[in-house]
Amino acid sequence: MAHAQPGIFALGTRSHHHLEFDVTRRGPEVLAAVAEACEAADAVAGVNLVVGFGARLWSEIAPGQVPGDFGDFEPVEGPDGFVMPATQHDLWVWLHGAGPDAVFDVARASATTLSAVATVAAEHPCFAYLSSQDLTGFEDGTENPPVHEAVRVATIPDGEPCAGGSVVLLQRWVHDLDRFDALPLEERERVFGRTLQGSVELDEAHQVPDSHVSRVVIEDANGEELEVFRRSSAFGGVIEHGLVFVALSRDRARLRTMLDRMAGRGDGLRDRLTRFSRPTSGAWYLAPPVELLTGGR
Ligand code: HEM
């Protein structure tokens, strides 16, 4: 059985740093540099490093280990000109730990190690806001599966290509907090479909069909809820701020369905949240199990 990268499930860390790279060298050289960066990060107590590969690069490194429906992020378009943009890169490195100083040091060291094979295309330093809240004040992660269930939700099953790995969605969302905060409490709660205090799901009488919860809670043909494991964190300062959304899943299909439903593709019902926050980036990565990171084939 292959083992997921442990940093995916290391909860409680308050400082996060996401780096996205475009590669300048071929797959095997990149994999060797990634292994070096992982080893260096392992030596720093309390900082987790998780790595993911874009479809093109991973197909070069491990052609037999690419899930059938895996590929680059394509823009997701909805009504009223709404677009979730695609900003796919080759490599994603996620560092997270207790505080910003050690995370910064490891992020910088990783970028230096990888500079032989790749250039930094984007970076997102992030932080945990209060007790796992989004900057809107609403608790983010209430319905996340607990870690013992998250492993099943977030890792590709045995027998499938890249088993033990995870499909990752990385999206940067910029909030318009002034507009959101100006809404009365009841309206703000309707946007998410949950209460601000206690994060309780609104009852049927108060739940609207375009609330965030109404759009992202989806089921399979047997009525089983299709879950994902979210590890998002807040970013920014007073001028621009929002959420770096990170979700890990055993397959890509459920995340694509959630994105389509948020954008209002198909039924035209756009997630109310997209009236107050807009995505400025979007990419898919594959976070392979540790066994493929050290001996990719
Ligand atoms: C601006 C971006 C986003 C914000 C601020 C946000 C915030 C939230 C909040 C506050 C909740 C309710 C509490 C919880 O269960 O965590 C929630 C739930 C959830 N969100 Fe988001 N979210 C965002 C984007 C997304 C995206 C892009 C997806 C999927 C592609 C997604 C999937 C989910 C799921 C699956 C749930 C759990 C629903 C449930 O089981 O009740 N979210 N989100």
Image: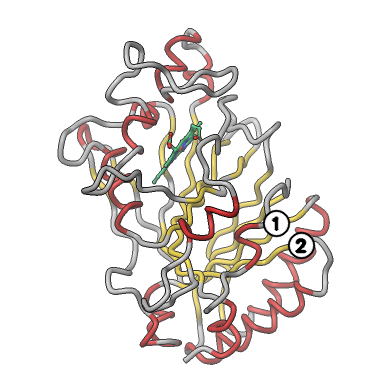
Residue 243 rendering spot, x and y as whole percentages: 54, 40
User: What's the residue type where badge 2 is placed?
Assistant: Val
Residue 207 rendering spot, x and y as whole percentages: 34, 18
The answer to whether 125 appears left or right of 101 in the picture is: left
Q: Are marks 1 and 2 in contact (CB under 8 Å)?
A: yes
| Quarter, ligand 1 | top left
Q: Is mark 1 on a helix, strand or loop?
A: strand
Decide: few, some or many residues near mark 1? Use Cα within 10 Å; few <14, some 14-19, many ≥20: many
Residue to which mark 2 is pinned: 47
Residue to which mark 1 is pinned: 96
Please report whichever mark, 1 or 2, sits nearer to the chain's N-terminal start. Answer: 2
User: What's the residue type where badge 1 is placed?
Assistant: His
Give the vertical position of 294 relative to 82 (above or below): below
Measure how far apart labels 1 and 2 are at the Cα level. Answer: 6 Å
Give the vertical position of 153 relative to 223 (above or below): below
Which residue lies most toward the front here? 222
Label total for image: 2
Residue at image coords 55%, 38% = 141
Residue 21 rendering spot, x and y as whole percentages: 53, 70
Task: State the image quarter where residue 72 is shown.
Answer: bottom left
The answer to whether 289 appears left or right of 108 in the picture is: left
